[in-house]
Amino acid sequence: MPVQKVPGGYRWGKTGKVYKTKAEAEKQGKAIYASGYAAGGLYANIHAKRKRIAAGSGEKMRKPGTKGAPSAKAFKQAAKTAKKGNK
């Protein structure tokens, strides 16, 4: 996903943090892809984002019901395709 010029700076993707320089936004984009963005489904993306947040990316998890947050339908679909763990 390309870096976009927005009011106040640059942003990687459609939503999220606005960075002062294009280089900072590109660095964030590279970090997102390196952490497994869009590979492995809903829960993989959630865990990857939590990992980036813990590393100090400045991102925040979206609140349930907000635009762009996974819906209840998305979680139900993910549960149908989830692999059974060893318990």
Image (cartoon, grey):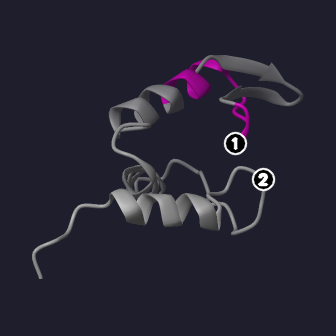
> Are there few (<14), some (14-19), or many (20+) residues within 10 Å of tag 1?
some
CA separation, marks 1 and 2? Answer: 15 Å
Image quarter for residue 6?
Answer: top right
Q: Which residue of the protein is positioned furthest toward the right in this rendering? A: 7
Q: Which residue is located at x 45 percent, y 36 percent?
A: 32
Mark 2: secondary structure: loop
Q: Position of residue 12 (x, y in %)?
A: 64, 28
Q: Say if 47 sits above or below 87 in the image.
A: above
Q: Say if 27 sits above or below 57 in the image.
A: above
Image: magenta residue range: 14-27
Residue under numbered circle 2: 67
Quadrant containing the C terminus is bottom left
Q: Which comes sooner in the sequence, label 1 or label 2?
A: 1
> Are there few (<14), some (14-19), or many (20+) residues within 10 Å of tag 2?
few
Residue under numbered circle 1: 17
Question: Which of the pair 85/6 is nearer the observer?
Answer: 85
Question: Which of the pair 27/60 is nearer the observer?
Answer: 60
Q: Say if 41 sits above or below 18 in the image.
A: below
